[in-house]
Image: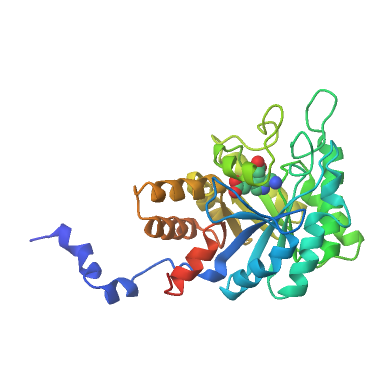
Amino acid sequence: MSVFPDLRLRRLRKTEPLRRLVQETYLSVGDFICPVFVTHGRNVRQEIPPMPGFEQLSLDHLAREVTEIAGLGIPAVLLFGLPEAKDPQGSGAYAGKGIVQEAVRLIKRETPHLVVITDVCLCEYTDHAHCGVLLDNGVVDNDRSVELLARTALSHAEAGADVVAPSAMMDGQVAAVREALDEAGLDDTPILAYAAKYASGFYGPFRVAAESSPQTGDRRGYQMDPANVREALREIELDIQEGADMVMVKPALAYLDVIARARQEFDEPLAAYNVSGEYAMVKAAERLGWLDGRRATLEILTAIKRAGADLIITYHAKEAARWLRGEG
Ligand code: PBG
């Protein structure tokens, strides 16, 4: 018997049409969620150095941005806000006329079909930049923080947010948000839970963008240890029990195994967050001429999809949408 093992799999790789026929994973613009940073003030377009192509935008520049995003066929944005003032309680997060609340109203007016997802956290609003409020000993007070997160989510939904995404990694935050929404008659507002969110070194550029680096300590007391995967499944399971409609693994790239496990174990829609540091790495290497940014980006996004993510939150959303349309 003669075998040519090196040839057997290559038969189906011979030509582009053949390769297309056997392609297993497809990236679609319909999977993308594009982050947007809104800031106080007027006529602000503040570049974010470690995130080329991203800016903090004041409300007067927001309409143009969301119109562009919607025009590219991207179905959703994820909103982050930079308030004028920060305080220990993060009161800007749940202010009726807070920056995110105003941004939501504007986006729903300008581009009503764009799905507006709001990040529900206190870290951009507290002066210490932790994701919740602190006890005297500097530890984040879980239950008091959960109350404020529920208040924040409710104020976003009242402003018109289509989906709220609690991201503070406090225990019980999803149940509290669900209860607050239901009590207010907003029982049809879905929750995207940042369920398995790791204490990651890949959030660095975001913390420049959101001005949210902890003033003391770090987030390891509430975000997950990168060494753990079984614990991620417990986090996801609990969030689903608490009422999450969709769950998330974050970051994406160093956690493809977590995405794959989550896909195996749960049927709820699964989001992956291709975070700021993952974006910055590609942009930096591209700038240095060390890799082909477009190829690397499409490969990364395809891999996230292949691992099992249904939705991808990514800073590459706009450029990838253009590439998928055959532009640029
Ligand atoms: C918390 C939040 C963070 C990110 C998204 N939501 C920061 C953090 O946990 O420190 C990071 C996203 C990224 O790096 O792109 N509000």
Q: Nearer the viewer, residue 180 or 324?
A: 324
Q: Does the image show residue 246?
A: yes
Give coordinates of residue 293: x percent, y percent: 40, 55
Residue 182 image-quadrant placement: bottom right
Identify which residue is drawn at 64% across, 46% down: 209
Residue furthest front in the image: 43
Q: Is residue 309 left or right of residue 96?
A: left
Residue furthest left in the image: 2
Give coordinates of residue 230: x percent, y percent: 58, 40
For the C terminus, the quadrant is bottom left
Give coordinates of residue 119: x percent, y percent: 72, 53
Identify which residue is drawn at 76% across, 58% down: 42
Identify which residue is drawn at 23% across, 73% down: 15
For the N terminus, the quadrant is bottom left
Q: How is the image coloured?
A: rainbow
Q: Answer above or below: position of 89 versus 83.
A: above
Q: Answer above or below: position of 237 versus 2.
A: above
Q: How many marks?
A: 0
Give coordinates of residue 206: x percent, y percent: 61, 45
Q: Is residue 6 left or right of residue 80?
A: left
Q: Does the image show residue 257?
A: no
Q: Nearer the viewer, residue 41 or 321?
A: 41
Q: Nearer the viewer, residue 55 or 242?
A: 55
Q: Answer above or below: position of 15 versus 139.
A: below
Residue 180 image-quadrant placement: bottom right
Q: Is residue 150 left or right of residue 316?
A: right
